[in-house]
Amino acid sequence: MTNSHSRCKAEAIIEKVFELTTDEYLQQFIDEPIEKAQGNFEFDDEALVTHRTFFQVTGDYVRHIYRNALRPSQILSDYQAQAEALAILEEGYQNAYAKGFEAAFPDASDPNQNGLEPVLAQLGEIITARARLKHVTWVYSSCIDPSNWPIKCLIAEILHERWGRLFPPRLLAYTSDQLADSLPDLLKALRRTNRIVGKVMKGEMPFYELSEMP
């Protein structure tokens, strides 16, 4: 493969990675199906929240989203769905005082709160974040051949040429060869920086917040 062909291949890989990891793409193919499934989920929001109803409803909710919103679709049994719901809560649910189930169940059973609805909403947010991360990780691993060292070096070189000014300061001194094995981290950093710059340009984030970032 000639140098020009190799460079074209590297540029095509970068374009594909960026195409499949834009916020617009993630919103359309991950967020929106989950939001739709959330809107279609029904439960008795006036029922007394006991441990039994808590696990039943959160399990039904997770099973509903996994079946109707995730790609590929996943079919879970009652036991699997309830275990998955608990695992998700332990991983990411929190309030001002606690985390995991120790935070979620008191929130749902507190008569001064809104029952299970806020808990389910946070469950949905965690599922969405996990699905986004899984998708982005899949894009990197499927588009970038870890055994093709020359192409990896070319990708790093092109990223440095085009977006070096956006690199985190700690990466500026690295050569393309040194960055080749850290492409996923580099691409994530560029995605994050581009997202922040986009928010500033749209007026969604004050410029002084950008200037204060490390």
Image (cartoon, helix red, strand yellow):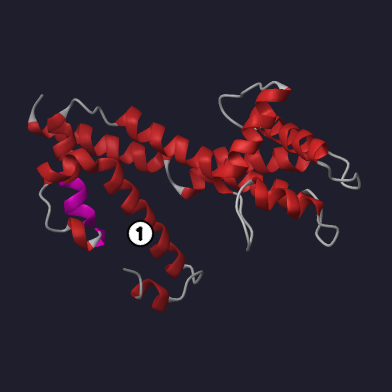
Q: Is residue 189 visible?
A: yes
Quarter of the image with the N terminus in it: top left
Residue at position x 61%, y 23% in the image:
74
In this picture, residue 119 sits left or right of residue 200: right
Quarter of the image with the C terminus in it: bottom left
Q: For this rendering, which residue is in front, 93 or 137? A: 93
When asked about the image quadrant of residue 76, the answer is: top right
In this picture, residue 152 sits left or right of residue 109: left
Q: Secondary structure at mark 1?
A: helix
Residue at position x 35%, y 59% in the image:
193
Residue at position x 81%, y 56% in the image:
110
Q: Residues within 10 Å of mark 1 (few under 14, many from 20)?
A: some
Q: Which residues are magenta?
A: 157-167
Where is residue 123 shown, x and y percent of the image? 65, 45
Q: For this rendering, which residue is in front, 97 or 65? A: 97
Where is residue 152 shown, x and y percent of the image? 18, 35
Q: Which residue lies under the disc numbered 1? A: 193
In this picture, residue 30 sits left or right of residue 190: right
The amino acid at mark 1 is Thr
Secondary structure mostly seen in magenta is helix
Where is residue 159 shown, x and y percent of the image? 22, 48
In this picture, residue 168 sits left or right of residue 49: left
Where is residue 122 shown, x and y percent of the image? 65, 50
Q: For this rendering, which residue is in front, 110 or 24? A: 110
- Where 158 sits versus 74, above or below? below
Q: For this rendering, which residue is in front, 128 or 78? A: 78
Asked if the magenta segment contains residue 153, the reply would be: no
When asked about the image quadrant of residue 95, the answer is: bottom right
Q: Is residue 68 visible?
A: no
Residue at position x 82%, y 38% in the image:
53
- Where 205 sits versus 176, above or below? below
